[in-house]
């Protein structure tokens, strides 16, 4: 079986520390795949806020996710401290990719737990249509 292999960027422009909550656990007693997407969304929201944006208000438009890829490397459990790093790259005329790295912080070491990528489009929610990305926005997000 072929596995997803996500090539992360060399540098990340934003990182945030989070703690795994009991509500993040699934019936297996570890972080579930649905929760990983929620963790990515939280980090993405914080990244956008650091740039002065909201996911639904970037120069009057929003973002919509068109795909997601996740590569699991290490189990995450209750009360684990993690560092989620985010970078925006691979811009084209309509969209771009967010790359994420989740590291488990353990004994002052960073252990890779997850690599992920989400494909994003700039989207006009009022008119239900894609919107081209401007050079200004590319500079602001890069």
Image (tube, rainbow, N blue to C red):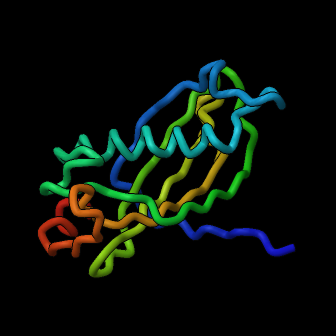
Q: Residue furthest bottom?
A: 93
Q: Nearer the viewer, residue 92 or 124?
A: 124
Q: Position of residue 8 (x, y in %)?
A: 53, 65
Q: Is residue 5 left or right of residue 134?
A: right
Q: Give how far across and how far down residue 49 sits, in percent.
A: 25, 41
Taking the view exactly as shown, the residue that stands out farthest to the front is 127
Residue at the image point whose x is 63% and y is 50% from the top: 114
Q: Say which quarter of the image contains residue 110.
A: top right
- Residue 100 position in % (x across, y down): 50, 54
Identify the residue at image location x=66%, y=46%.
113
**Residue pictured at 75% horizontal, 30% vertical:** 26
Q: Is residue 100 above or below residue 84?
A: below
Q: How many marks?
A: 0
For the N terminus, the image quarter is: bottom right
Q: Is residue 12 left or right of residue 31?
A: left
In the picture provided, is 1 more to the left or to the right than 140? right
State the image coordinates of residue 54 (x, y, percent, origin top left).
24, 44
Q: In this rendering, is residue 81 above or below 116? A: above
Q: Which corner quadrant holds the C terminus? A: bottom left
* In the image, residue 93 above or below residue 122: below
Q: Which residue shows up at 60% across the image and 26% down it?
A: 20
């Amino acid at each position: 079986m072929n596995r997803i292999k996500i090539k992360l960027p060399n540098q990340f422009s934003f990182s945030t520390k989070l703690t795994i909550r009991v509500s993040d656990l699934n019936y297996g007693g570890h972080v579930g795949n649905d929760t990983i997407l929620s963790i990515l969304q939280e980090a993405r929201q914080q990244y956008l806020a650091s740039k002065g944006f909201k996911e639904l208000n970037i120069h009057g438009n929003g973002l919509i996710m068109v795909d997601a890829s996740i590569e699991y490397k290490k189990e995450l459990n209750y009360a684990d401290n993690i560092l989620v790093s985010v970078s925006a790259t691979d811009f084209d005329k309509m969209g771009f990719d967010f790359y994420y790295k989740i590291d488990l912080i353990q004994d002052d070491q960073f252990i890779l737990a997850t690599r992920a990528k989400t494909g994003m489009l700039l989207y006009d929610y009022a008119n239900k249509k894609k919107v081209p990305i401007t050079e200004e926005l590319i500079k602001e997000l890069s």
